[in-house]
Amino acid sequence: MLMPYFAFLRGVSVNRIGRTGVVLTTASVISFLFFEILHTMGVFINAYFGLITYLAFPLVFAVGLLLIPIGWRKYQKSTGKTAKELLSAKFNKKDIAAAPGGSRLFRTILVFTIMNVVLLSVASLRMLHFMDQAEFCGTACHTVMNPEWVTYQKSPHARVLCVECHVGQGIDALFKSKLNGIRQMYLAAFRLYNTPIPTPVHQLRPARETCERCHWPEKFYGGRLVTTVSYKTDSSSTPVYTTLNLKIDAGLSGHKAGAHWHISKAHRVEYTSVEDRREKIILVRFLQPDSSYREYRNNHILSDEKESGGTRTLDCIDCHNRATHIYKDMEKAIDFAVYAGRISRELPFIKQRAMAVLNNRYASHQAAFEYIRKGMEGYYKQKLVEKPEEKKNLLEEAINCLQDIYTKNVHPDMKIYWKTFQSYAGHHGCFRCHNDHVVDNTGKPIRHDCTMCHSVLSQESGHPYEYLFKKGEREQSLQDYYSREFLNVEF
């Protein structure tokens, strides 16, 4: 029969250090089990609760375990007695008497050791699982990560865990990410982080190990028809449509290539950029069929701009750099809100006025809310003379929507404003390399004509499918078409 629990604890509590160790281990175990039950029941689910449960309590437990042998060792030195003499003084003869399975003291220590290992293992696994959740990443360091958390929740990858892209697969990736996490916790605790968070994030695993687990070049072939809508700044906020045939083919097996030629396995594109920011390109080279490289250099690079972080192989995130944490362009965000019906075109000059109140730098979200409301109500005070009650409701909906747009895309605390983070999935990204200044040794630039990536079927027209019909056809033709086809509108 094992020694009573309390008798053993009294035996190892030989001095203040030992007693502190016993108190810490006992209290942390009880607290961990209690908090784990509450967490399982869903009583507490926020990140701070998880930090206490899965990080603080196990850490306190481990510290307590270390203090017990430290206290015993110090007690032994202070008394000058041997371990056998001290054990005889603290435990009775039955506890330390030799037996086939070891003494009762030995068996008790063995059982407690096994329990400690199991508890620490379970706590560690639960901690890893908790820290892999998106909510932990977004809310544990609220001030720093709140902008990324807000944009993540509305992104196309909102159901993909943060660790899928920011950590990757394998033990090596996990170990490196946890070391980086410790550094980030230190920076957050002492407010040593940059505002805004610098981009690009160089610690990301290669896209072939992350993005291409779901997306890969063979998935992109042929073309894609896309219709975009925007609104004029006239009194009616008139909609205009642009229809493009995007060429997304990867150029496999001799087929005509499109935008995804850059990442297909048959091609390899490498580049260097100023300070490895991936914004201003210094050199571009791509692998040719004869295994040689064709090289282009930017002749507008200044002498003090030639530093870079080395050569990088182009992959998904070099163009889709805002695939998840998407900060919308102000005008496009307003356009989408109008299209979705959250802002009514019945309010005169609503597009123009919305841009005017959003295009300011406010000190805080609260200040933005106040000025957006004052700016909208003051402007429309004399304009809503027809059906004032109905228009008042529309105005209130528009104000709430504009405040929401500002909250999601502008974060003064982290110095994130309109256009702080640019997306390269469009002209801004393409023209980094495809321009007149990036040339080969003969002075010939990389091709940059628009038809390489898309064909413009209609531009700022009054109807999204106007290009399908000959000029002069009856309006009924368009109406018949709308009744059969789904309008795919993107922003």
Image: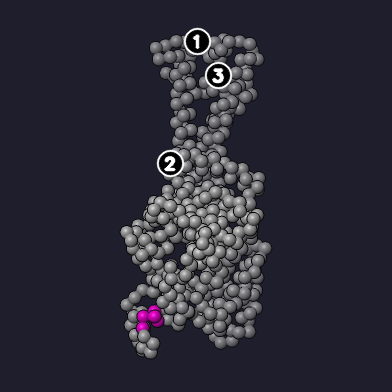
- Mark 1 or 2, closer to the camera: 2
Between 395 and 39, the one nearer to me in the picture: 395
Work out whether 169 lies above or below 441: above
Q: Is residue 287 visible to the viewer in this orientation of the structure?
A: yes
Residue 64 picture quarter: top right
- Type of the residue with mark 1: Lys
| Colour convention of the picture | one colour
Residue 382 picture quarter: bottom right
Say which label, 1 or 2, has the lower sequence index. Answer: 1
* Residue depicted at x 33% and y 63%: 255
* Residue depicted at x 33% and y 61%: 254
Between 394 and 406, the one nearer to me in the picture: 406
- Type of the residue with mark 3: Gly
**What is the x, y in percent for residue 391?**
55, 81
Magenta segment's dominant SS is: helix
Kindly identify which numbered label has been placed on residue 93.
1
- Type of the residue with mark 2: Gly
Tell me the CA gap for discs 3 and 2: 44 Å
Q: Is residue 411 visible to the viewer in this orientation of the structure?
A: no
Say which label, 3 or 1, has the lower sequence index. Answer: 3
Q: Which residues are magenta?
A: 465-469
The total of numbered circles placed on residues is 3
Kindly identify which numbered label has been placed on residue 11.
3
